[in-house]
Amino acid sequence: MLNYAIRRVLAMIPTLFAISIIVFAIIRLPPGDYLTTAIAELEAQGEGADPQKIAFLRQAYGLDQPAWRQYLDWAGGLLHGDLGYSFAYNLPVGAIIGDRLGLTVLVSAATILFTWAVAFPIGVYTATHRHRIGDYLFNLLGLIGLAVPNFLAALILLYAANAWFGLSIGGLMDDRFVGQDWSLAKLGSVMAHLCVPVIVIGMAGTAGLARRLRANLLDELDKPAVAAARAKGLSPLTVLIKYPLRAALNPFIADLGMLLPQIVSGSAIISVVLSLPTTGPLLLDALRSQDTQLAGSLLMFLAFLTVIGTLLSDLALAVLDPRIRLTGGADR
Amino acid sequence: MSDEPDALPHFVSTEPWLPSEPTAPVRTRSRIPGWWARLRRHRLAVLSGAILLALYLSTLVCEVLAPYAPDSRHSDFIHAPPQAVHLLHAGRVVSPFVYDTDESLEMSTLQRIYTEDRTRPEPLRFFCHGDRYRFWSLIDGDFHLICPAPGGTLFLLGTDRLGRDLLSRLIYGARVSLTIGLLGVALSFTLGIAIGGFAGYYGGWFDFLIQRAIEIIRSFPELPLWLALSAALPVSWSPLLVYFGITMILGLLDWTGHARAVRSKFLALREEDFVRAAMLIGASPARIMVRHMLPNFASHLIASAALAVPGMILGETALSFLGLGLRAPIVSWGVLLNEALNINAVVLYPWLLLPAVPVIVTVLAFNFLGDGLRDAADPNA
């Protein structure tokens, strides 16, 4: 097991390396950089920018260096926990994103928990009550959940809450807690505000997972072991739990690698719609204003989040499923 | 294959082949009928297919269908609410009409108030002459299926902040939103089949490289990557270039799923006897792949293509909605929804949310159709 874990962690390094190169290439794609844009703007307003300050900034942030040198500085800084400098905010990136990283992780983790908690009973119910009315009902609900775009659902919910109940469901906490230290009351407020985004972001993932669990469970229920257990006179619940359910649970862990990018994507756009203080709206602004280092660090963080999530799911899967740790890799 | 020694050169007889009796042309049994019959049992899939067909046909003639040109502004009718079509006036059934709307300004809130004038019906005109347009940017015309009464208005879905008819813009937006999905899928599919096919057929280091590349691309959250790439599109590009740019971005990142599916199928099929036979006859790899291997799971491919289109349409909608995809003067459903990003505007003018309806209908229809196609392709699944 340790062997497998070490190999799996080592395999992550080239992946992250490749991802960092891609991120760096993408954020440098637009012509010019933030400084040239800012200077042009200042000059258009008739205020010449202080050439000394520009030269200093150029040098300090290596904008006069060749691309590979800039990449090395940037990637090296990331390794040291230095996320770079945001030109638009005139602050180190770390100071801007502070809380937002934590809240992004919180939203993602809460969505995964929600997905599991809801998909599990639905999957088991629909598999054991095949071709009953409940099965069809959940099937239809699932199809709709899979197909309705989450940001449109968020928009409609936002409108409905506002128009019918006079509620404002945006934000991640009550206004009076913004900028305050963490307290129990603030935590409670955050939890209350989490419901809507978590449901909206998790909608598609939940529907997909419930479908997968149903299909897997149906396969397992046909196996001789189940017939034997039933023939021995075990109660239906014991029959279900003893073997088929355990075998059918794999996708809950294995699909995490697929689920996470989806959730991170979803939370980025939902955060913009519901104005959540996570990394999504910040990334959008940074991309719009060509705030390269901020955008790069945020993209890198989001990719890192999914890579780590996939790593955790692979490790958990190896703990659960001996076939994987013995043959040395998931062959999905 | 390659481990067999080349003992003898391949022998091919040059003698003309004279069969003793003339052979009847071989009748290949098409797979289509059974497949079609199975698809037709899926009522929902057939219905979805019909809806999609109608939507796509409408994009061909949107100039005629739309009552107004997409950019014609009505400065007296800014944020006007949808007008209802009536049939009854003064207790009598008359031809379809709308009531005239009067505008007044509420001075305390500076909000425009629109009231129906119940005494002045404005009968609709059909097959009529209205706003001028260039059909497909080629032919000048002014023929419309439906027009407002002379001097009257016809805003069935209300107007936006510049007084443009929302219904007309929705109809025009379909042209962009629906085709971007098809083009994007065509691109990602071609890439996926080519890359996945070569990886699966040849294996080895190429396969290894492709596998790693796919893993890396898939570990990226899709939307932030799309956002970053479309933020990189130069602002100076013309609308058409931006349209193709967005299509490329959507298509270039989406091939990985198709490549994986094709690769695993090819890996399995490569070991089949008929593929070995084709190799022995001396068919080229390209012919083996296209003629012998692909038809084996073509129906699956069609089904997964249908399931991939909504992702593309949603991608465009999401990007434009966030303001980083298509931009005005292009009209697409996402561009229209961009106005709904401001929730305060939506609360006052809820019809701005209406562009969400065709998006959801299209996405649902593609999903149902794709499900039906998949079941029809593989009755045992």
Image (cartoon, coloured by chain):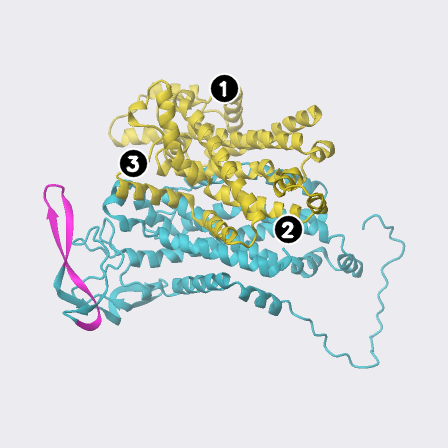
Chain colours: A yellow, B cyan
Quadrant of residue A14 in the image? Answer: top right
Q: Is residue B260 left or right of residue B121?
A: right
Spatial CA distance of label 2 from label 1 is: 41 Å
Tag 3 residue = A168
Q: Is residue A37 left or right of residue A228?
A: left
Residue A103 visible at all: yes
Tag 1 residue = A81
Residue B269 percent across, percent down from the top left: 72, 53
* Residue situated in front as seen by the camera: A213 or A60: A213
Tag 2 residue = B262
**Marks 1 and 3 belong to one chain:** yes
Tell me the magenta residue range.
B92-116
Circles 2 and 1 in contact, beta carbons < 8 Å: no
Q: Is residue B26 above or below residue B337?
A: below
Q: Residue at x 40, y 20 (%)?
A: A95
Magenta span: predominant SS is strand
